[in-house]
Image (cartoon, rainbow, N blue to C red):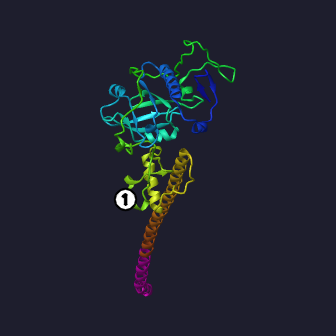
Amino acid sequence: VNFDLSRNLIVSYDPKTAALAQPLTSQSNSSAIERANEVQASLPSELPSFVKLMLPSDVAGCFWLGLPKKFCDAHLPKDDVTVVLVDKDDQKFNTKYLDRKTKLSGGWKAFSVAHNLLPGDVLVFSLIEQWKMKVYIVRASSLNEIDGALGLLNLAPCDMNVYQHQNNKDASNLQTAENMDIDLHQDNGLIMYDHSLDDTEYADSQVSEGLRFTQSVIEFKDIKGVDDFSIVVDNLVIDSEIPKHFQIKYYDLCRGQNMYLHENLLKGLNVKLAVGIILETITIADAIRASWVSKKMEQTKAEEEMRVIKEKLCGVREVIKNLNVEMETLKLKGQNLKPVIHKEANAPW
């Protein structure tokens, strides 16, 4: 279900139809920009935001995104940092912000592909936290889909299946449903339509965290250590979805078999499901290892008890040996006393 501003109602929409949309015209671009401006106007006034029209170079080829310089100078740092993009489902994508070029590079491709961005789509970026931006997607398709608008709008409840909005301009203003305590100033009206094509060298830039695509996977035999180890499923690096200590454990498991244990996962498997399978594999391995350690501890304890018993047994044997010697000594004394006693018994009284 998505919100249709042009028709003033909520409509159902199949995302697959976006791929079948006809070529976009300047009129559809203008319509998408107008709807994006309405979304931007509904955002909290204290949150900086800007609108960005998607060009072919933004969503295909080198995959980098130019940002408005005015916005970057006012709200982004003066050095390269990781900027987090948050979509309507609160899924986070880490991207590399290049200060010198005022562009998003590494990680932007993953966001673009994950959301099926097409030329003519318009994105509204809202800075909700330091180096974190909420992204609302206004589709340029015929159905005028606005991704994330339902999470933005505070719609009044209604018993009807289709919610009709008033045509009155003042009454149709969108109200925000998000309360964000952040002292920033809005920077409206910033729309980037073009940028230079001199940044292809940054196309393959990577960020230290976040989902990202890779064109090749290192053969496991060529991995020298855990620092070279990345978990790649369907050419998507999912290291950011798995805690570091689990990655180390998983690397040890893979090294034990001299192969990627996940290389035979079904193609097209959901990322979260793949992560769950890997984490469960690590958990099972830990349980087996813990069981083995417990068994080893029990065996060590039993061996220690056996050692103590053997020491006690040796002590008992030593006592018995001493008693035998003492008994032999007493026998000898008895034999020596026998003639004396016999003599005394036969002596005249």
Q: Amino acid at mark 1?
A: Lys
Q: Dominant secondary structure of the magenta stretch?
A: helix
Relative height, residue 260 to residue 25 (above, below): below
Q: Secondary structure at mark 1?
A: loop
Which of 271/193 is in front? 193
Query: 195 or 276: nearer the eye?
Result: 195
**Residue 57 coordinates in the image, percent (x, y):** 43, 38
Q: Nearer the viewer, residue 28 or 236?
A: 28
**Res. 84 image quadrant:** top left
Mark 1 sits on what residue? 224
Which percent across, then down, holds residue 219? 43, 59
Does 193 sit left or right of 14 as displayed? left
- The stretch in magenta equals 322-348
**Above or below: residue 22 compared with residue 9:** below
* Number of numbered discs on residues: 1
Quarter of the picture containing the C terminus is: bottom left
Confirm whether the magenta stretch covers residue 215: no
Q: Nearer the viewer, residue 73 or 285?
A: 73
User: Where in the figure is residue 251, as x and y percent of width and height?
Assistant: 44, 55
Can residue 176 be spotted in the picture? Answer: yes
Q: Quadrant of residue 159?
A: top right
Q: Residues within 10 Å of mark 1 (few under 14, many from 20)?
A: few
Residue 349 shows in this picture: no
